[in-house]
Image (tube, rainbow, N blue to C red):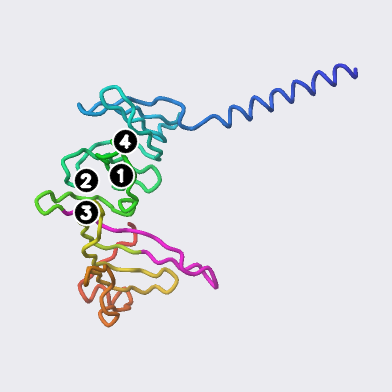
């Protein structure tokens, strides 16, 4: 009986170890798909939920980058208007219209992530003026007590590139404070080389009725 108990205990330990190994299996171990755009080939790795967690980028058969991400699909665009393709991966965490973007670095022959794109919703490339137009939408918890108060920001923004750096030119939008039920209309612009909000005197705190009466709209379903 003692030997049987020892045997059963050993089996349980083995099963536990196998479970730990299985659960610890990397989420980027499964090759989901391979994409070729004519210049680069992309090996998309993830898990059985079809979430892309790693992208191996190859050029002429040689690996040049391994990108960590959380995405659902991949496409290439020249995001900084330098004549080189960059990578846009549809965000699996923020939803449709958001992207994790990786910019090609010619000197290093690799791609690096630019997180300024993370809050851009539906970015539109203006190649003629070398600008990016988008909607900025973000949510921030600003108070926890006595009740949770979130600041939800939505605005129309314009970005541009200068010496390889992505800078913001302007933003006009509305902030909504959930606990107070009030709205703030704001404008931001680049002044003397610095991007900042305009004079606070230009800001208004309104009720929903005052906001709509002034010609603004806010869809709470978004």
Specify the label residue 73 is tagged with.
Answer: 4
Residue at coordinates 32% horizontally, 48% vertically from top-left? 114
Residue beneath disc 1:
101
Q: What secondary structure is marked by label 4?
A: strand
Q: CA distance from mark 3 to mark 2?
A: 14 Å
- Comes first in the chain, label 3 or label 2: 2
Secondary structure mostly seen in magenta is strand
Residue beneath disc 3:
163
Specify the label residue 79 is tagged with.
Answer: 2
From the image, state whether disc 1 or disc 4 is nearer to you: 1
In the shown orientation, is residue 52 left or right of residue 86? right
Q: CA distance from mark 3 to mark 4?
A: 29 Å
155 shown above or below 214: above
- Comes first in the chain, label 3 or label 1: 1
Instruction: Say whether marks 2 and 1 touch (CB < 8 Å).
Output: yes
Q: CA distance from mark 2 to mark 4?
A: 17 Å
- Comes first in the chain, label 3 or label 4: 4
Residue at coordinates 27% horizontally, 83% vertically from top-left? 201
Q: CA distance from mark 3 to mark 1?
A: 18 Å
Please report the bounds of the magenta region as a residue range: 131-152
């Amino acid at each position: 009986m003692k030997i049987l108990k020892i045997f059963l205990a050993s089996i349980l330990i083995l099963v536990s170890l196998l479970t730990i190994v299985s659960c610890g299996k990397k989420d980027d171990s499964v090759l989901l798909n391979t994409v070729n755009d004519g210049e680069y080939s992309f090996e998309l790795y993830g898990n059985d939920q079809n979430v892309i967690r790693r992208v191996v980028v190859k050029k002429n058969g040689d690996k040049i980058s391994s990108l960590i991400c959380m995405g659902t699909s991949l496409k290439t665009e020249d995001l900084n208007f330098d004549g080189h393709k960059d990578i846009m991966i549809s965000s699996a965490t923020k939803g449709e219209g958001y992207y994790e973007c990786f910019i090609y670095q010619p000197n290093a022959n690799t791609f690096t992530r630019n997180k300024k794109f993370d809050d851009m919703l539906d970015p539109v490339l203006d190649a003629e003026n070398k600008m990016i137009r988008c909607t900025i939408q973000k949510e921030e918890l600003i108070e926890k007590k006595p009740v949770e108060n979130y600041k939800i920001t939505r605005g129309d923004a314009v970005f541009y590139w200068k010496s390889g750096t992505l800078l913001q030119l302007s933003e006009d939008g509305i902030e909504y404070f959930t606990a107070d039920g009030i709205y703030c209309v704001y404008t931001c612009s680049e002044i003397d080389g610095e991007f900042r909000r305009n004079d606070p005197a230009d800001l208004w705190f309104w009720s929903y009725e005052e906001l709509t009466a002034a010609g603004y709209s806010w869809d709470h379903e978004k």
